[in-house]
Amino acid sequence: MTREKGVSRIIRSNAAHPNLKEEIFNVIDTKENAYWLGFLYSDGGISIDKRNKAKRLDFDLKKEDVGVIERFVDHIHGNKNKIRLRKWKLKGDQISLGKSIYLWNNRLCNDLLKHGLMFRKSKIIEYPEKSQKSREINLAFLLECFDGDGKEGTSCLTCGSKKFLYQIKKKFNIPNKIGINIRKDKKNGKTYKNYELYLGAELFNEMLDNYKYSLPRKRIRLKPRKGMSIIK
């Protein structure tokens, strides 16, 4: 019975997305694919039903960036009518609106898992070294990671995984040190750790020049400091 439930979910999802390109992430061989892989690293994840091994791609964005989720669904030839409105509770009675989509498809999810995507990933993700072949592909991936987790108007990329930032630092020969921010939640008393790495203006501007279809509000060119350059 459990297995039937898992199968029926995938069947319903296939019917809802009849034109889905489920093999689209088999190989990350274009800047477009690399950018969207970075998008999923920042704002997506894979969940697995342990009872029947059915896999689901989950992602959501807040209201100011909902155009991006529609572009992604177009990229994979999904059904945009299946994008749902989502509400997040903020402090007090405040509500933040966004959109999300859940997509059951084992082939699509297995390829993304192969490229390093996972569920509950923020503190354990690693750079998908084997998937990224050329500098152009790597720059497109890094750009979307910034679109998801970068500080607007700066070159600062934040992440819960220090290892992920270290791998980026090493790959792009970034001289800046990895910083740490520690925040204590007054309500539950828990301490939250986040790491940050400044990519530098030259690398940041190179990312913008390499791929022109990233998040508009974060496409703010930076002025390099004198005497600083990146090593290619």
Image: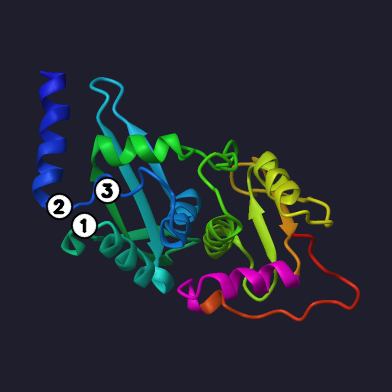
Residue 102, numbered label: 3
Q: Which residue shows up at 44% across the image and 49% down it?
A: 28
Numbered disc 3: secondary structure: strand
Magenta highlight on residue 210: yes
Corner quadrant of residue 188: top right
Q: How many marks?
A: 3
- Crowd around label 3: few <14 · some 14–19 · many ≥20 (10 Å): some
**Colour theme:** rainbow
Image coords of residue 212 (percent x, y): 49, 75
* Amino acid carrying mark 1 in the image: Gly
Identify whether 121 is placed above or below 182: above
Using the numbered discs, state the Cα–Cα distance from disc 3 to disc 2 in whole angstroms.
Answer: 11 Å
Sequence-earlier tag: 2 or 1: 2
**Secondary structure of the magenta portion, mostly?**
helix
Numbered disc 1: secondary structure: loop
Which residue range is magenta in the image?
201-216
Using the numbered discs, state the Cα–Cα distance from disc 2 to disc 1 in whole angstroms.
Answer: 5 Å
| Left or right of 208 in this view: 118 | left
Q: Which residue shows up at 41% across the image and 36% down it?
A: 113
Please state, as top left, top right, bottom left or bottom right, where the C terminus lies in the image: bottom right
Q: Are marks 2 and 1 in contact (CB under 8 Å)?
A: yes
| Left or right of 11 in this view: 183 | right
What residue is pinned by disc 2? 17
Corner quadrant of residue 27: top left
Nearest to the eye among marks 3 and 1: give it.
1
Q: Which residue shows up at 10% across the image and 42% down it?
A: 12
Q: Is residue 85 visible?
A: no
Sequence-earlier tag: 3 or 2: 2
- Crowd around label 2: few <14 · some 14–19 · many ≥20 (10 Å): many
What residue is pinned by disc 1? 78
* Amino acid carrying mark 2 in the image: His
